[in-house]
Amino acid sequence: MTGSPYTIKAGSTILIIEDDIAFAELTSGTLQEHGFKAIGATSGQEAMELLSATIPSLIILDYSLPDMTGIAILEQIADRGLSVPFIMVTGRDDALLAVQMMKTGACDYLLKDTSFLDRLPAAVLRTLHDAETRERLLRAEESLRQSETRLARAQKIARMGSWEWNPLTGETYWSDELYRIFGFTPGEPHQVEMEWFINLINEADRPAFKKAITNAARQCQSFSLIYRIKSCNGDELVVNSQAEVECDSEGRAQLVSGTTLDITARIRAENEIQQLINYDTLTSLPNRTLLNDRLRHAIAQALRDRQMVGVLFLDLDRFKGINETLGHRAGDKLLKTIAKRLKACVRETDTLARIGGDEFAVVLMGVSNEEVITAITKKILGLISEPICINGHEIYTTGSIGIAVYPMDGEDGPTLLKHADQAMYQAKERDGNNFQFFSSEMNIKVLERMMLENSMRKALEREDLFLLYQPQVDTRTGEITGLEALLRWRHPDMGVIVPDKFIYLAEETGLIIPIGEWVLRTACFQAKAWQQQGFPPMRMAVNLSAKQFAQKDLSGTIAAILLESGLDPDWLELEITESTIMKDPDSNTRMLQKLKDMGISLAIDDFGTGYSSLSYLKHFPINRLKIDRMFVRDIAINPDDAAIVEIIISMAHTLKLSVTAEGVETRPLMEFLASRNCVEMQGYLFSRPVTAEEITTILENGLKY
Ligand SMILES: Nc1nc2c(ncn2[C@@H]2O[C@H](COP(=O)(O)O[C@H]3[C@@H](O)[C@H](n4cnc5c(=O)[nH]c(N)nc54)O[C@@H]3COP(=O)(O)O)[C@@H](O)[C@H]2O)c(=O)[nH]1
């Protein structure tokens, strides 16, 4: 094999099918001399048997065999699915036969003449080489086909298509997946015109695409671009195209090729996440997160334009009541309607956000003066107060709005919002349906309130709270029938503070619960102590605030305190204001009944100031009405008040309730009330609220008035 231009694997097996044994041996000898392994068969049948055991690299086939022709053998070999190169050998020099043999797939044919053995090695080498080349080509083609299939599969999975565009000729190539992404059948249209493609792109995104593709063609600039495109079936897709440019040595673009990825699902998911992060699910308005962001931008813009930003903090009045009476669904509907109305009041450039249950915020951009803000605020209040029909109910609601203005009331979003919130509270305190601009005095008030709240939290631990007791007197006998426990706070810096100055704050912060429990416990222990000291038993009246009364386990707490102190429930009276009961008359009547069943006596405090209807009053399981001191005070100068007091007294008697007049400061007042059959009274005439020690002295010496 020396000098051969071919590199054939040494030892390749060659099958010689030849019935002329002498000729076969000569052939075999020559092949072995050239390093091949030769095996032989003298008939077609023997050859087929050999082929069952061994697959040779080449067959040298005699055209005429005793049992079958060479062509018949080849057919049988093909039937077995074998593909072995072969050289046909014939004794006839016949051109037609030669053509026929080549048609059967013969790689070569040799004449059995005198030069046969000389030509044989070269023919064998050439045939084997061709076969190997063909084999390699087939393998390469197969591998290419496989990688194309894999690529197509990967593209399909990734929803990614590939493409090419020749900027010189305008010719394009799209992968099958790219056709599919855009909703077309692969290959249709065969040639994609760039202009036609650009027309499928969303109009807003077209300029960016045109710029990218032009820069790629003119300046060999690669690009990555996200754009929207209308698919064949009309759906809008979001795709990301990335392109590379092949340039010639002079920097001219020859080919722009790239990939296009369908990112519609990803963008949709991202949008949904953004929606959840930045928007309120009920009203679809921006939430607090997005509001803060918009406020930051609004302030930056206002700083550049030397303008103002108005921040409105809106809270619906009595929304909680609507929610509780009509249910949360109705509450939700109301909020949606309000959101819609608010939208109608502000411009596109402004921001309207929902930042809490019934709290909304509005950021008014580019405002030149406060009158504009006032006008918009009034418009908002007007629209909110229009009736809303929900589930057949006509609901009337109002709002309270606090306003803070950049740059006067704060230089950053959180400060502006906080100040608008503080101003809103002021508006609410004025009975709602109102608005209020923030003022620095307001801020001082809020700071004071914060400080008060902080020290109130410490008051219980530091034992800064104490009780005073005020006698309730039977004016027929002058005996003390009861004592009202009245809370005081000895503030380390501010001195003694009366409840009107801090109970509201304790209510708002929830501190009223531990404070109220402390009052009840202290009062019960004190009442029991006086009994144990041998004084005749007296009622101990304790005030309960609305929040305490709303506690589910109130009766349990009171029962535990009574048990702890050893005070008989008969000697405890709870004073609840008329307005507390009227917040939810039905459920509160149940709580009153529970307490009454425990043997506790119940009094309606400040009677006459609320709006309890007679029908309710009849059903409240109460023992006593306390006439508010506001009416008692003015009996002498205001005939209306005198008439009201008379009516309350006679109503109490009709309903078989005890009645106590509060705030009796003078003897004529006492005489007037006594003449109207009100025997029990409380007021400065008898005693101011005093300490337990002073009450002990009074009990020892008798009450002087
Ligand atoms: N939830 C709780 N509320 C409480 C508690 N302790 C008191 N309070 C309520 O605070 C309000 C103010 O109470 P106070 O400043 O103690 O005033 C009481 C009396 O001092 C005052 N009073 C009594 N007699 C007269 C009088 O002749 N003239 C006059 N000007 N004032 C007088 O009235 C208050 C008692 O009122 P009332 O409770 O309605 O009987 C007050 O509403 C308290 O209820 C507490 O522990 N928890």
Image: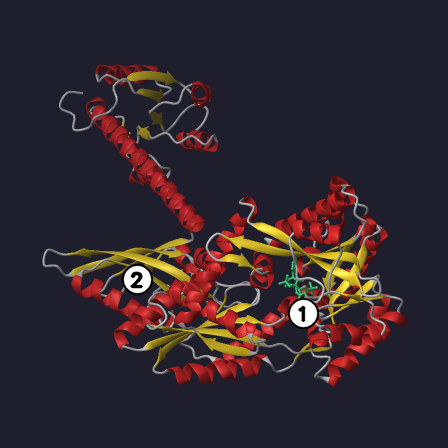
Q: Secondary structure at mark 2?
A: strand
Q: Amino acid at mark 1?
A: Ile
Which residue is at a point 21% across and 18% down the rendered structure image? 34
The image's mark for residue 172 is: 2
Q: Amino acid at mark 2?
A: Thr
Q: Position of residue 210 (x, y in %)?
A: 28, 69
Occupied quadrant, residue 260: bottom left
Report if residue 613 is visible in the image.
no
Q: Which is in the foreground here, disc 1 or disc 2?
A: 1
* Residue matched to label 1: 322
Rendered image coloring scheme: secondary structure
**605, 399: nearer the viewer:** 605
Decide if residue 246 is on the left or right side of residue 662: left
Q: Residues within 10 Å of mark 1 (few under 14, many from 20)?
A: some
The reply, left or right, for residue 66 in relation to residue 662 is: left
Ligand 1: give its quadrant: bottom right
Point out residue 321 in the picture as x, y percentages from the top left corner: 67, 68
Residue 697 visible in image: yes
Give 334 or 311, whichever is nearer the viewer.
311
Alpha-carbon span between mark 1 and mark 2: 66 Å
Residue 179, horizontal then vertical, whole percent: 41, 60
Give 22 or 323, whichever is nearer the viewer. Answer: 323
Q: Quadrant of the N terminus?
A: top left
Tell me: is circle 1 under 8 Å from ligand 1: no
Up-down relation of residue 100 to residue 88 (above or below): below
Quarter of the picture holding the C terminus: bottom right
Please name the residue shown 31% across and 74% down the image. 302
Residue 388 rendering spot, x and y as whole percentages: 65, 79
